[in-house]
Image (tube, grey):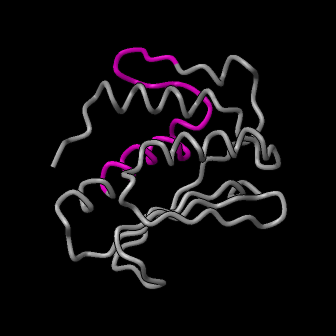
């Protein structure tokens, strides 16, 4: 199974931070979910669920409503200055809107799912990314 490299993690996190994913901004949230989906194996089972002004991406290795592990995260953030949507690093610390809540977890979830698919694991795993956690 391929490991998530530091460069890949930083690149993906930087791209995620660049999306101004305020809770009600359906356009930015869709673009962020499209990017996330592009990082997931094409062998994954993927559903996109819309609920009013929110959308949720559900990606899994095995079709089930009760996965062994559910990795739940969100891509929406609270409002911030435009410069906060450009990630910066200093002394190996990343700064930007959403880096600690919770955009950092998304590359990890994608890589975990892809690894389970690659190894044909029997553990059922679902990565769920919502766009309305902040409200």
Residue 92 occupies quadrant: top left
Q: Position of residue 126 (x, y in %)?
A: 42, 68
Is residue 36 rendered to the left or right of residue 113? right
Q: Residue at image x 21%, y 76%?
A: 122
Is residue 102 positioned above or below 83 on the image?
below
Q: Where's residue 40, x and y in %? A: 41, 49
Q: Is residue 29 magenta?
A: no
Determine the residue positioned at 67% across, 66% down: 49
| Span shown in magenta | 88-112
Question: Of all residues shown, which one is farthest toward the front?
Answer: 42
Q: Is residue 50 above or below residue 92?
A: below
Instruction: Kindly indicate the quadrant of the structure image that contains residue 52.
Output: bottom right
Q: Nearer the viewer, residue 3 or 34?
A: 34
Q: Is residue 6 left or right of residue 45?
A: left
> Magenta stretch: residue 107 in it?
yes
Which quadrant of the figure contains the C terminus? bottom right
**From the viewer's perspective, is 67 left or right of 117?**
right
Residue at 76% across, 42% down: 22
Horizontal arrangement in the rendering, residue 19 relative to residue 9 (left or right): right
Residue 94 percent across, percent down from the top left: 45, 25
Q: Residue 64 occupies which quadrant of the picture?
A: bottom left
């Amino acid at each position: 199974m391929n490991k998530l490299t530091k460069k890949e993690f930083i690149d993906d996190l930087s791209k995620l931070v660049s999306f101004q994913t305020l809770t009600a901004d359906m356009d930015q949230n869709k673009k962020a979910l499209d990017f996330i989906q592009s990082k997931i194996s094409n062998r994954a089972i993927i559903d996109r669920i819309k609920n009013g002004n929110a959308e949720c991406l559900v990606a899994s290795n095995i079709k089930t409503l009760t996965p062994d592990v559910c990795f739940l995260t969100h891509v929406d953030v609270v409002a911030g200055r435009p410069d906060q949507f450009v990630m910066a690093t200093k002394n190996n610390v990343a700064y930007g809107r959403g880096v600690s809540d919770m955009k950092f977890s998304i590359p990890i979830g994608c890589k975990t799912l892809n690894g389970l698919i690659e190894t044909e694991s029997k553990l059922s795993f679902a990565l769920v990314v919502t766009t309305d956690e902040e409200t």
